[in-house]
Amino acid sequence: MELRRKDLLGMADLTAQEIGLILDTAASLKEISQRPIKKVPTLRGRTVVTLFYEPSTRTRMSFEIAAKRLSADTVNLTVAASSAVKGETLADTAANLQAMQPDVLIIRHQASGAPHYLARRLRCGVVNAGDGLHEHPTQALLDLLTIREAKGRLDGLKVAIVGDILHSRVARSNILGLTTMGSRVVVAGPATMLPPGLTALGAEVTHSLEEAVRDADAIMMLRLQLERMGQNFLSTLREYSTHFGLAPRHLGLAREDVIVMHPGPLNRGVEISPEVADGPYSVILEQVTNGVAVRMAVLLLLIGER
Amino acid sequence: MHLLITGGLVVDPAQNLEAPRDLLIVDGRIAAVELPGAIPSEGREVLDAAGLVVVPGLIDMHVHLREPGEEYKETVETGTRAAVRGGFTGVASMPNTKPVNDTAAVTRFILDQARAAGLARVHPVGAISVGSRGEALCEYAELKAAGCAAVSDDGRPVMDALLMRRALEYARTFELLVISHAEDLHLRADGVMHEGPVSTRLGLRGIPAAAEEVMVFRDVTLAALTGARLHIAHVSTAGSVEIIRRAKARGAPVTCETAPHYFTLTDEAVCGQTPDAALNPAYDTNAKVNPPLRTAADVAAVQEGLRDGAIDAIACDHAPHGLLEKDVEFAAAAMGLIGLETSLGLSLKLVHEGILTLGQLIARMSTHPARILGVPGGALTVGAPADLTLIDLEREWTVAVNAFASRSRNCPFEGWQLTGKAVAALVGGRLVHQELDV
Ligand SMILES: [Zn+2]
């Protein structure tokens, strides 16, 4: 039982069997996090490097905790965008990293395709922790695990993804992962934030939040980047939250056992009302817990057998 | 000096000729075009062109030679060497050098470098506006006197419609062609590839077809208003082809060109060319070009435009870049690809596939560019300069960027098998390229 690949670059690359394997492994690893001593020696002596070109405390910490619970050594590099501009190129960085001989590199970069660029040049495994607008596969995997735990399955479900699809790598990875596993995905948002070709990715498209959440098994709300207002992707937060913010009244349209998800951090009162975020349908904190489990599984499956 | 070229099939769209002919060249000019064997060979140097096609020297009206200023990418010498290897005896060099070719001094420098290289003829294109900044007009009369064949701010559009109107009127005064790089920068925004399903899948910011089309429409409208001669560079979308076709039907003084990559590749090329490209996007920066590679429907429309004459010319927009600009993440990479050494081979695919006749192709790669630019060449009539290209239509070869004469390597066609190659080129009767025996 192993993942026969060097890198995890995107959900687009993964088969249903591979996704199933990662989720099963993650589910079994969750138990470790409940122990008083939350550590197993599986990856002792392995080096995990996190290289983040965008600030993201949450994702980096989640990877770091995952690596530490498997006893790997971790090194964290955060590169400010400004120093990357005047400083070394990604090719230089790749060469330097290679010389340090890590076992796996976890990279977040503002440019779509940057992990693919590094993966071509590095002998070590590369895990995409978010590249530009492209993919964020471990986020999708933790979302899939969360949905599977709540529903007992992934096939035949209806999942709504709502908000700024255009700028969301979380949405892309989830559309790909969910449809691979047999879920039906409906995306909703204003036309300014829906890129062309979403149907080619496997999603259904609507401009109506109500239509998206009707009979949904899971609702995934995306974080609205507030700078999108200045770029005229929307008029005002008031209008956005009226039409695309999830409020208690919407939950009545969904299935009785609907779950509400959000990749965080939340803009309470913008894309999600506080009542919903903190209400009984919310699984937002389970997502965080599952994030550690999924990342442990990915590390284990990529470098555990070597 | 007498040179006799014997046994070739002469294809000269300028005189509607496609027949076996011998050509006599005397003192750099075509002295006679006669039936095979009609010109005595005694005392003359003979070039055996049996099995080859002899055409007026190919002219690429859109290349970037990068000199002055970016000699690590290309120089006039390396660029014109790439040109003659690709069968081009003349090229029009775009003004976005450093400094910009917005004065007679820069124009003269480029022409001096071209003379020193002694390869292809170079027809410098001057800038529309000082520094191509889109603010003030350059001295068109002076640029023309120094040797500029046209003006353009290529690399960037003239965003100010009033300035474009004035440029067209002012250029008309001195009978200068205006070449438009049609792109609305607001609509392009921070786009890096064609906007469509592929950009969505790759998570790359899109450039809609409309970013080109609204400017093509603006500029053909201004050409009709001013009566000035306008040429639209690098047409890449079905919409642009249709706008230009209609403008021509109404009599607007408009011509246009497209590049081999726009009738050969789609935006899928950005994913790389491996069999599992769709699953494993490679973010090939050599496929990053402006305007971007479009859809299969656009490719078909560009081919149809070439066939029915809506598109007048093929020009490769040879845009050399180094590893510094290309061996980086996709969003950070410079736009452009090199084309001089693959242009003919890729264009001949249109002939092999029955989309164009050979005569139509040569018209679009020689006769028309010469006419549009108003430069010598493009015809094999008696008295014309002896600029010729000899083509072996059957020669099979594999694109290998490391063998290119160009100083740059940013070519998305590496490893492609092509059929047909320029095996010799003459400029002013002088053999500047030959690979006749293999
Ligand atoms: Zn241009």
Image: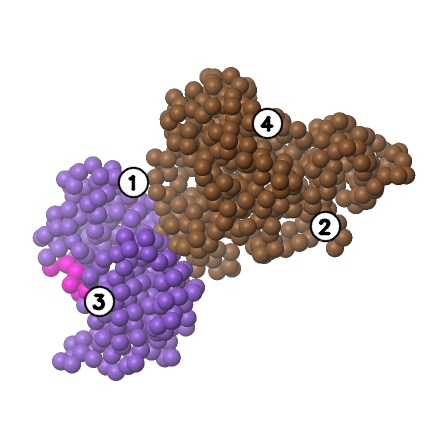
Residue under numbered circle 4: B372
Residue under numbered circle 1: A191
Foreground label between 4 and 2: 2
Residue at the (12%, 53%) spot, across then down: A276
What's the residue type where badge 4 is placed? Ile
Region in magenta:
A279-288
Residue at the (74%, 37%) spot, across then down: B429
Query: Are the residues flagged by discs 4 and 2 in contact, CB closer than 8 Å?
Result: no
Instruction: Determine which of the numbered discs, if any, sits on residue B435 in the image.
Output: 2
Residue under numbered circle 3: A62
Disc 2: CA contacts within 10 A as few (<14), some (14-19) or many (>=20): few
What's the residue type where badge 2 is placed? Glu
- The reply, left or right, for residue B157 in relation to residue B393 is left
Residue B7 in percent (x, y) is at: 83, 41
What's the residue type where badge 1 is placed? Ala
Q: Secondary structure at mark 2?
A: loop
Q: Is residue B63 above or below residue B312?
A: below
Residue at the (28%, 66%) spot, across then down: A50
Q: Secondary structure at mark 4?
A: helix
* Along the viewing direction, whichever of A263 and A50 lies nearer the viewer: A50
Q: Colour of chain A?
A: purple
Which chain appears brown? Answer: B
